[in-house]
Each structure stands twice: as structure tokens, then as C-alpha cells.
């Protein structure tokens, strides 16, 4: 391994970093709210099946390709053949787009964390807005940009530290902390009267959502598939990048199993904190994205004075989750430039590279921060006004008036499913699943379940990706 690039110091450190990448806003925000609006248990069941068939397989594919080539997505595909390089570039584009909106959301989480800290100190953290804080925050552009910058600088400082001394060191402390804080909140919530209804919603077999004409089986499948993919950080080369810093003695199959299991466990735990907390205070969990901010704020203020402490802990843990994810996205972009510099025979300057790319991402984040998440009456024009690409077809297309949704459509809706589909087709049909097997067996461990992985690479993953692609497009274009 090229020591100009660096390497993970330990298996535990790598796992914490990779699980940290996977566990993020997707788990603590997306999972509970999507589960809430997609029938609870039915969603959970489909999610688990998808994670086992598609998630684990794509995870192994990405980790193995990364370690085999010792490069990020662009370099990895390029080392097979020049004609595949563009697949890697799609990942880099996704990295910019996802990090741009992720930083704005991360900034909002940071702001809530600070607000509850002020509350704890006896100062009004909600700027006199009380329960309307969320509505206020969306239009407080100075605040949004400030906290977005704070979040980005935190991300940058860790990535500047490098693989072992930055990302690994931070994750190895932050991820166990996240776990114990979440556990504590779950126990505290469980002691609140009325929490039971929340668990029942999650775990009591109920498939009535399948006969809901608005959602139905395919509606649930589509949400669960998109959620699983984003939550596991798959499809843009994040795991290729993290895999490229692994030593050859590492057991890839075991890691590709542990990461999805841990990610799913944390998503479930987040559900077990959020759903019962809502049911205990008579709040809805089926209302969608406002859940993490507006609804949870109400939950904590209803808890009395101790609520400020729980509220602080809750947003602190989401902050950790978001930072360990955003560093993995910035690392994909940084690694790309590092690989390129090394290929030219020059000495890469990690610090300079990551600063430059952070500035670029910040510029991309500005439209997201200035349009009040599409709530109307914002500081800048909506995408369709600015780009002149209004979609007037049947159904109302969300991305017409929300920059976050537009970025999300391009990245999560189009490029990522295409990326994962092509990867699994290349592995299954062109390079053959054998290259994954060979790479895994370098550690000395025998490859398990070859037939299963082969079938998944060849058929299950491509079909699932095609399904996500079509479903997302139909969704966005109305
Ligand atoms: N998985 C993270 C979450 O659940 C987000 C994330 C990090 C991500 N890296 C990614 C999503 C790469 C897609 C691709 O919040």
C-alpha cells in the first residue's frame, strides 16, 4: 500500500469510521419519518429484506473494489479500463451534491444542539420563537449560513487530519459515545407513560398500508429501497474509498456484514427513541420530514426542565452521526484529488486539497441554505425560475421549487442507482464475481456463499436498482 495515501490503524477504527459513514441523518431522521409515513412494521420488514439482499452485496462489492485497486472510485474504475472512468466521476459529482445539502441540514442540527445548550444555561435558546423555532430558522439566512459553515469546518478539520489520525481517531471515540447516548435516551423515553403505542407501531405486524391507494406495496418498496441505499452510503464510491485504505489482511466479508447490521440496529434504535417519545406526548410521527426538528422540539419542551438536557443529548448525538457521515463524503472528493496527484508522480497535500474542495461545496450549499427548503418566499429564486426548467407535466414536481430536492434527485435519484447498477453488472457479468472472491480470500478466510453473491450481483442488484431509478423518476416528475 502506498504510504503517501495512509491506511486505517485498526479493524475497530475502520469499522467505527465505516459505520460512522453509514449512520447519519438517514438513520436518525430519514428512517423514523419514512417508517412513520409508510406503515411502520411493513416498511421495516421490506427494509430488512433489501438490506440483506442488496445492501450487503453492494457493500462487499465496493469494499473489495476499493481494496483491490487501492484507489477512490475514479482511480478504481480507471484501473480496470479507461472507458469506465466516468462511473467514478459520477460518484464525485454525487459527493459534491450530497455534501452540499447535507451540510445545510447538519448546520440545522448544530443550531438545535446549541439552542438546547443555551436552554440548559437558563438562556432562551429559541430566540423568543418557542415552538415556532423551526419556521423561524428556515428564513434566518445569516444563521443558516453561519451554522452550515460551522458544520463544514468541523468536517474539514477532521478530514485534514488524515485517515488514521483524523477520521479514524474521531470515529473511534464518537461512535461508541453515540451508541451510549442513544441507549440512554431510549431508556428514558421508555419510562414515559404512553410510550407503548410507539413500539406497537414499529413492531406489531400490520400490513394495512399495502391496501392504502396512496402508498401501496410498491410505494413502501420504493421508500425502503431508497432509504436503505442512502443509509448505507452506497452507490457513490464512499465504501470504495474507505475500502482503499484497508490492509490486505482485513476480512472483507465479515466487515461487509457488520456495517449493514450495525447501521440497521442504530436506525431501529433511533426509531425506538423517536416513535415512543411522540406517542407519549400525543404527537404524530406520520407527518414526514418535520419530525426531527419541530416535532422533537415539542417532545423535549413537554418533558419539563429535564427535557432540555435530553434535548441537548439528542441533538448532540445527531451532530455526531452527521459529522461522521459528512467526513466520509468529503474524503471521497479529497481522495480523488490525492490519487490524481500521486498518479502524476507528485506529493499530495491533503490539507490544501480538502480546504479547496470544502470551499467549492460551500458555494454549492448556498442555494440550499437560501431557499428555506422550498417553503416559499425565500431569498433566492427556486430552481425552475433560475434555471428555466420548470416541469409542467402531470402531478406537481417537488424539485421545481426546492434546491435540496433538485440536488437529491440528481444524486440519489439518478446517479447513485446507475452507479450501483453498473458496478454490479460489471462485477457479475464482465469481471465475474470471482474477482470479489479472490480479493476477499487474500486475508486467508474462505469466501462464503459464492452462489448467493453471484446471483445477487448478476440479477437481484441490477433489477433492484432499475426499480429505484424508475420509481424515483416517476416520483420526482410527478
Ligand atoms: N449514510 C449517511 C446517512 O445515513 C449519509 C452518507 C454518507 C451517504 N456517505 C454517503 C449517502 C454516501 C450516500 C452516499 O445519513
Image (cartoon, rainbow, N blue to C red):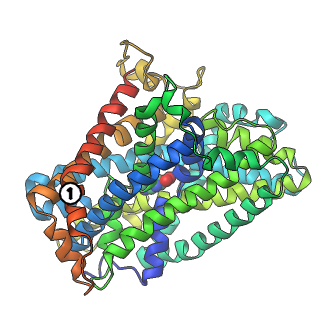
Left or right relative to 455: residue 80 = left
Which quarter of the picture shows residue 272? Answer: bottom right
Name the one closer to the observer, 382 or 375: 375
Q: Residue 66 versus residue 254: which sits nearer the camera?
A: 254
Q: How many marks?
A: 1
Label 1 packing within 10 angstroms: few (<14), some (14-19), many (20+): some
Residue 324 screen position, x and y as percent = 52, 63
15 up-or-down from 229: above or below: below
User: Which residue is found at the position 34% from the left and 56% from the top?
Assistant: 53
Residue drawn where x is 28% and y is 61% of the image: 336
Disc 1 target residue: 455
Q: Is residue 297 left or right of residue 212?
A: right
Q: Nearer the viewer, residue 289 or 97?
A: 289
In this rendering, the answer to whether 360 lies above or below 381 is below
Above or below 250: residue 309? above
Percent position of residue 473, x then y: 33, 29
Q: Residue 431, position in %: x, y? A: 10, 62
Q: Secondary structure at mark 1?
A: helix
- The image quadrant of residue 452 is bottom left
Identified at 43% across, 75% down, the residue is: 14
Q: Is residue 337 visible?
A: no
Q: Nearer the viewer, residue 335 or 70?
A: 70
Image quadrant in which the N terminus is located: bottom left
User: In the rendering, at what x and y percent does residue 16 appear?
Assistant: 49, 72
In the picture, measured across the screen, residue 84 lies left or right of residue 242, that is left
* Viewer can see residue 203: yes
Amino acid at each position: 500500500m502506498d504510504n503517501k495515501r495512509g491506511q486505517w490503524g485498526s479493524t475497530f477504527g475502520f469499522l467505527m469510521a465505516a459505520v460512522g459513514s453509514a449512520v447519519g441523518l438517514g438513520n436518525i431522521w430519514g428512517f423514523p419519518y419514512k417508517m412513520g409515513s409508510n406503515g411502520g412494521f411493513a416498511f421495516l420488514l421490506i427494509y430488512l429484506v433489501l438490506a440483506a439482499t442488496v445492501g450487503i452485496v453492494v457493500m462487499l462489492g465496493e469494499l473489495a473494489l476499493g481494496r483491490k485497486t487501492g484507489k477512490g472510485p475514479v482511480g478504481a474504475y480507471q484501473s480496470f479500463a479507461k472507458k469506465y472512468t466516468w462511473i467514478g466521476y459520477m460518484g464525485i459529482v454525487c459527493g459534491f451534491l450530497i455534501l452540499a445539502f447535507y451540510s445545510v441540514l447538519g448546520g440545522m442540527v448544530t443550531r438545535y444542539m446549541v439552542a438546547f445548550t443555551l436552554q440548559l444555561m437558563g438562556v432562551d435558546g429559541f430566540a423568543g420563537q418557542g415552538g415556532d423555532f423551526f419556521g423561524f430558522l428556515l428564513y434566518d439566512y445569516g444563521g443558516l449560513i453561519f451554522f452550515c459553515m460551522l458544520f463544514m469546518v468541523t468536517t474539514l478539520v477532521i478530514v485534514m487530519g488524515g485517515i488514521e489520525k483524523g477520521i479514524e481517531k474521531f470515529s473511534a471515540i464518537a461512535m461508541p459515545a453515540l451508541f451510549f447516548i442513544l441507549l440512554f435516551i431510549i431508556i428514558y423515553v421508555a419510562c414515559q407513560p404512553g410510550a407503548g403505542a410507539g413500539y406497537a407501531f414499529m413492531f406489531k405486524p400490520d400490513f394495512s398500508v399495502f391496501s392504502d391507494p396512496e402508498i401501496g406495496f410498491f410505494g413502501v418498496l420504493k421508500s425502503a429501497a431508497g432509504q436503505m441505499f442512502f443509509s448505507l452510503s452506497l452507490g457513490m464510491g464512499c465504501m470504495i474509498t474507505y475500502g482503499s485504505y484497508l490492509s490486505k489482511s482485513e476480512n472483507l466479508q465479515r466487515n461487509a456484514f457488520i456495517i449493514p447490521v450495525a447501521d440497521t440496529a442504530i436506525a431501529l434504535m433511533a426509531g425506538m427513541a423517536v416513535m415512543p417519545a411522540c406517542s407519549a406526548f400525543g404527537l404524530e410521527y406520520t407527518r414526514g420530514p418535520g419530525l426531527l426538528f419541530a416535532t422533537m422540539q415539542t417532545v423535549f419542551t413537554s418533558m419539563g426542565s429535564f427535557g432540555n438536557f435530553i434535548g441537548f443529548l439528542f441533538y448532540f448525538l445527531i451532530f455526531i452521526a452527521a459529522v461522521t457521515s459528512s467526513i466520509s463524503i468529503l474524503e471521497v472528493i479529497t481522495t480523488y484529488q490525492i490519487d490524481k496527484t500521486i498518479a502524476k508522480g507528485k506529493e499530495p497535500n491533503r490539507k490544501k486539497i480538502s480546504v479547496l474542495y470544502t470551499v467549492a461545496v460551500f458555494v454549492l450549499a448556498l442555494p440550499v441554505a437560501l431557499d428555506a427548503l422550498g417553503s416559499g418566499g425565500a431569498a433566492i429564486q427556486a430552481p425552475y425560475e433560475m434555471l428555466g426548467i420548470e416541469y409542467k407535466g402531470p402531478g406537481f414536481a417537488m424539485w421545481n421549487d426546492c434546491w435540496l430536492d433538485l440536488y437529491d434527485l440528481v444524486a440519489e435519484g439518478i446517479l447513485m442507482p446507475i452507479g450501483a447498477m453498473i458496478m454490479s453488472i460489471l462485477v457479475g457479468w464482465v469481471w465475474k464475481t470471482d474477482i470479489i472472491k479472490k480479493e476477499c480470500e487474500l486475508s486467508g478466510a474462505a469466501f462464503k456463499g459464492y452462489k448467493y453473491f453471484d446471483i445477487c450481483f448478476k440479477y437481484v442488484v441490477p433489477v433492484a436498482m432499475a426499480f429505484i431509478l424508475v420509481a424515483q423518476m416517476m416520483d420526482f416528475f410527478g
